[in-house]
Amino acid sequence: MGYPGERLGLPREGSGAVAGFGRRIGAILVDWLISTWAIAQGVFQVSTQDASWVGMAVFAGAYVLLVGTLGMTLGMRLFRIRIAALDGSQPNLLSVLVRTFLLCLAVPALIWDRDQRGLHDRAAGTVAVRL
């Protein structure tokens, strides 16, 4: 059976290894809290009722901008992970857009393969790896 990422040519441990579930959940929670509370409610001062859709829009916009340019969001940086194309390079804009759209739908991100890649990663040709 092997370890997560072995079929992709990734190391078992350390930098470049597949990021585990805990790191990924922690990163997305930080990003969601920043998007919803700090930006949507703090900066834009939207009501609690509108915070969910404004927060999602802020989350998606920040995600595309940051992952598209840096390969990681603030939450990912805190949890020491980044998003990479399967060859280890920075994912292209189309991959980031596909991944972000599917991540915002939530369900594709919750269905994983044995390499711990969600459907959003598989569709985008990306993988979350440790820094």
Image: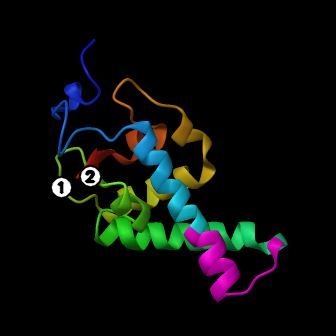
Most common secondary structure along the magenta stretch? helix
Q: Position of residue 40 (x, y in %)?
A: 66, 78
Front residue of this view, candidates 46 and 78: 78
Q: Does 123 sit left or right of 3 as displayed?
A: right
Q: How is the image coloured?
A: rainbow
x 28%, y 11%: residue: 1
Compared to residue 29, the image places residue 38 above or below, namely: below
The residue labelled by disc 2 is 84
First in residue order: circle 1 vs circle 2: 2
Q: Residues within 10 Å of mark 2 (few under 14, many from 20)?
A: many
- Residue type pointed to by label 2: Ala
Q: Secondary structure at mark 2?
A: strand
- Residue type pointed to by label 1: Ser
x 23%, y 60%: residue: 90
Front residue of this view, candidates 97 and 131: 131
Quarter occupied by residue 78: bottom left
Region of the chain picked out in magenta, as a range: 34-48
Q: Is residue 35 magenta?
A: yes
Front residue of this view, candidates 107 and 15: 15
x 20%, y 26%: residue: 6
The residue labelled by disc 1 is 89
Q: Report the residue that reaches farthest toward the top.
A: 1
Quarter occupied by residue 22: top left
